[in-house]
Amino acid sequence: MEDNIKDMSLSELEGFVETRVWRLMIKAALDAVSSKMEANNQIDPFKDPTTICRNQGYIEGLNFLIDYPAVLKEQVEYERKKEEKEEKKDG
């Protein structure tokens, strides 16, 4: 069975982000982002630019994860509105 955004309900998504597991994952991600940002503040950009770039990529990846439920919510709402418009047009 293929998962699809159209099959997701907003209440399902909201329920997920309210779970303790999600909150713990977000806390861990935020702690890791903070750690990488602190590390970047202490790295000499002329001596070790590669580490700074890697840390920035790590931070960007975790920010994507943290923001993903909000992105999914927008996509679900968009798909719902799109379907409603199509139903009104056809109906």
Image: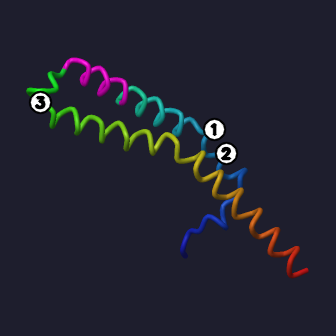
In the image, the segment drawn in magenta is 33-42
Query: Real-space Cα distance between discs 2 and 3?
Result: 43 Å
Label 3 amino acid? Asp
- Kindly state the secondary structure of the residue where label 2 is placed: helix
Query: Real-space Cα distance between discs 2 and 1?
Result: 5 Å
Chief secondary structure of the magenta span? Answer: helix
Confirm or deny contact between disc 2 and disc 3 (CB under 8 A). no
Residue 88 lies, with reference to residue 38, above or below; the image says: below
Report the residue marked by disc 3: 48
- Kindly state the secondary structure of the residue where label 3 is placed: loop
Confirm or deny contact between disc 2 and disc 1 (CB under 8 A). yes
Which label was assigned to residue 42? none
Magenta-colored stretch includes residue 65: no
Report the residue marked by disc 2: 15
Q: Residues within 10 Å of mark 1 (few under 14, many from 20)?
A: few
Residue that lies at the very extreme toward the bottom in this rendered image:
90
- Residue 61, how many percent across, how many down? 37, 44
The quadrant of the image that shows the C terminus is bottom right
Q: Which mark sits nearer the N-terminus, 1 or 3? A: 1
Q: Residues within 10 Å of mark 3 (few under 14, many from 20)?
A: few
Residue 42 shown left or right of residue 60 in the figure: left
